[in-house]
Image (spheres, grey):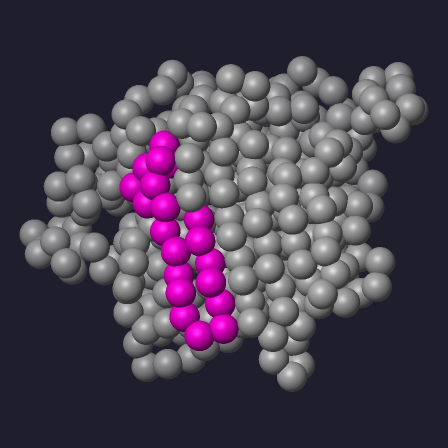
Amino acid sequence: MYTRVMQESVPTPIEQGMPIAGTWKHSFEYVNLLDISRPFAKPLPKAVRDSRIKEWQNFLVQDERFLLEATLSNVKFYRWAQVFLYDKESGQKLWFRKILPFSGWRMPLTLSNASVDSRSYGIFFRIHNWLDANIVKVDLDIEPTSSRPSFTAHLEFEIDETKLEPMAVSLLFSEERSMYSYKVLSPVRGDMVFGGQHLSLGGAKTAGLFCDYKGYYPYRMNSTWCNAFGFVAAKGQNDQKKNRRYGFSIAENQARETFKNNENALWIEGKLTPLPPVRITQPNGIQSDWIIQDMEGMIDLVFTPKESVCNEMNLFITNVEYNIPLGYYNGMMVTSEEERIHVHNLCGLGQKLYMRV
């Protein structure tokens, strides 16, 4: 059975100007990768070092009917906001992406109490990270067009680290360059208005995955994520009222020594199981089945895409290919307590990103 050392909290994943690798039980007080004294072989001005840091926050919310994915990202040469909403009953979907040149704002260095917002033509996107009050707030407002209805949302991720077990990791690309991520699966409450229809979120059937990322990612960045969550019956129970909230976030990236530390996690009723590294393959292409497996016998999943959004941007200074298929997961996972979780038609997302910038 795979195990991983879960360290106690530290203020930051940087010590004496060097990044440290590990997995922690709680969020950091702050994460500023510019505190790394010399991330490159040659000494470079602060502005140049800062230009190599990519950072974003991602939100995935789902109930029985709707799946919402929203991302606010800053890669310094440009920044983008994207929103994807899918109605599982009708098949109606909303897709919005806004790309703005250069960096006009920064993602927060702390999750304790800090905010960021993006205001531009067609969209308002605001995030208030407020873990001191056990909450992360997200506000979205997308203006309508002739081909797209309006969309407004106010969401609150209820993140109480005394009741939920998040996972914070610092992973190394080299001795001097690292990435950080914070992930947690939590209850979500809020409201959405889509095309004039008001939707209330909350109760026992709504959950959300919140992710925070920063990193000195390679010039050619390759990452694949598989995220999904839903409800599974308690041991020996078939009563839906006793179903448990569970979900996973699995990634394959360019970090090294991923057996010791990685960003893969499984949650059941807030309890965390750190997962081993995985291999994610698409033998017949991105739009066909994805195979997700490990070497420890804890993960054996197949992701079948049903709907897909593809982003491509090819400019002189950058190239981006970002595929976000929505689909269903089937297979098996094992918790740290050796409970086998049978995954059956669990709705979720796959994400495959290639970025040269």
Say if 11 sits above or below 316 in the image: above
Q: Quadrant of residue 93?
A: bottom right
Say if 214 sits above or below 158 in the image: below
Q: Is residue 304 left or right of residue 354?
A: right
Say if 179 sits above or below 69 in the image: above
Q: Is residue 318 left or right of residue 44?
A: right
Q: Quadrant of the C terminus?
A: bottom left
Place of residue 9 in the rendered image (x, y in percent of width and height, measured from the top left): 36, 20
Total marks in image: 0
Our reading of the magenta stretch's main secondary structure is strand
Range of the magenta residues?
A: 108-127
Q: Residue at x 74, y 20 (%)?
A: 339
Place of residue 334 in the rendered image (x, y in percent of width and height, measured from the top left): 70, 26
Q: Which residue is drawn at 18% across and 55% down?
A: 49
Q: In this view, does 18 lie to the left or right of 58?
A: left
Q: Which residue is drawn at 55% across and 27% down?
A: 274
Q: Does the magenta stretch include residue 110?
A: yes
Place of residue 166 in the rendered image (x, y in percent of width and height, measured from the top left): 51, 28
Q: Does the magenta stretch include residue 165?
A: no
Q: Quadrant of the N terminus?
A: top right
Q: Which of 21 and 74 is in front in this view?
A: 74
Q: Can residue 281 be seen in this view?
A: no
Q: Residue at x 60, y 33 (%)?
A: 186
Q: Is residue 50 visible?
A: yes
Q: Nearer the viewer, residue 181 or 222?
A: 181
Say if 168 sits above or below 217 in the image: above
Q: In this view, does 43 lie to the left or right of 318?
A: left
Place of residue 29 in the rendered image (x, y in percent of width and height, measured from the top left): 31, 29
